[in-house]
Amino acid sequence: MSGQHAVDIADLVHRYGDRVALDRVSFTVEAPSIFGLLGPNGGGKTTLFKILATLLRPASGSAHVGGVDVVSNPAAVRSKIGVVFQNPSVDGKLSVLENLHHHGMLYGLSGALLKVRCAQQLDRFGLSDRAGDRVEALSGGLRRRVELAKSLLHGPSILILDEPSTGLDPGARISLMDELHQLRDRDGVTCLLTTHLLEEADHCDRLAILDHGKVVAIGTPDALKQAIGGEVITVRCADAAGLGERLGARFKTTAEVVDGTLRLEVANGHAMVPEMIEAFPGEIDSITVGRPTLEDVFVHVTGRRFWSGGAE
């Protein structure tokens, strides 16, 4: 599918009663690539995941996965995708191999072909020596590998993952992203994942940032951060609003109050810090300066911090 759209979404809308979960969402995902849906709880990520996985019909708009409409032909979409849910979908009482075997049968695999596919996935994810172990005895990272192996048994070209690193320790999260990169590079699999982890989103090829059901920014992580320009200065003080006005007038810039702190986006911010401290002695409790992060991108486009969203 190289050079084609693995996912094509246009003006997608979905509601839960009076609440709008998706508000005219549009984007495309190139194949093969790793595409992230980044947003706080309540952003619309899980709703979009369910629609792409054919678990939920949208109110309006269109979504094509692998060139197939998710509403008119969900069975064909399911043959093209592998799905990894946020909550484990493996049976802890069964062995690793038994989980793969039963899942393969659901996709019509049997006999020698099923045996070969199971062996391939066990080898791919370093599970061959754990094939006979009960899944409940495995670590969180290994259980996630079983989930990935299971989802790829039928040879999908697109893998959709909902918060795949939930419950994993930092080392297992890194390992998971490495495995997704290998799937993209070695097997040509397109991976679309939802996440609320900024460091995980930083390892995606492209991102769509969702907030209250809208796509508020889209692009590569680097391009999104570079669009801010300069550096970000964060100031903690007793009177953020008052000091912000005087800082803006003194340095001819805009100082925003975000969650009780002052935030400035300026070129050569590190050079400005000593002048700020000297101009307002005793008024600044702490001051930090750094290059823009994805957290800064979110603040820039929404006016609030990433973790101040609601529940989905």
Image (spheres, grey):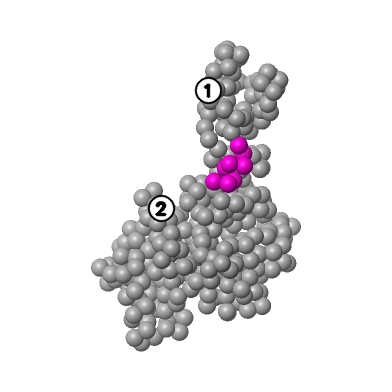
Label 1 CA crowd tier, 10 Å (few <14, some 14–19, many 20+): few
Q: Residue furthest left?
A: 129
- The kind of residue tagged 2 is Arg
Q: Is residue 106 above or below residue 250?
A: below
- The kind of residue tagged 1 is Ser
Cα separation, mark 1 vs mark 2, equals 32 Å
Q: Is residue 198 magenta?
A: no
Q: Nearer the viewer, residue 36 or 225?
A: 225
Question: Which tag, 1 or 2, sits closer to the chain's start?
Answer: 2
Q: Main secondary structure of the magenta part?
A: helix
Quick check: marks 1 and 2 in contact, CB under 8 Å?
Answer: no
Q: Quadrant of residue 112?
A: bottom left
Q: Is residue 85 above or below residue 169?
A: below
Where are the magenta residues, as a range? 222-229
What quarter of the picture does the C terminus occupy? Answer: bottom right
Q: Nearer the viewer, residue 182 or 235?
A: 182
Which residue is at 60% across, 37% downward?
A: 229
Identify the disc placed on residue 255: none
Q: Quadrant of residue 109?
A: bottom left
Which residue is at 52% across, 55% downward?
A: 205
Query: Residue 202 appears at what percent x and percent y?
Result: 50, 48
Which residue is at 68% across, 53% downward?
A: 214
Residue 260 shows in this picture: no
Which residue is at 73% across, 67% downward?
A: 60
Query: Residue 187 appears at what percent x and percent y?
Result: 43, 68
Label 2 CA crowd tier, 10 Å (few <14, some 14–19, many 20+): some
Query: Residue 139 appears at what percent x and percent y?
Result: 33, 58
Identify the residue position indicated by label 1 in the image. 286
Identify the residue position indicated by label 2 in the image. 173
Q: Secondary structure at mark 1?
A: strand
Query: Residue 182 appears at what percent x and percent y?
Result: 40, 62
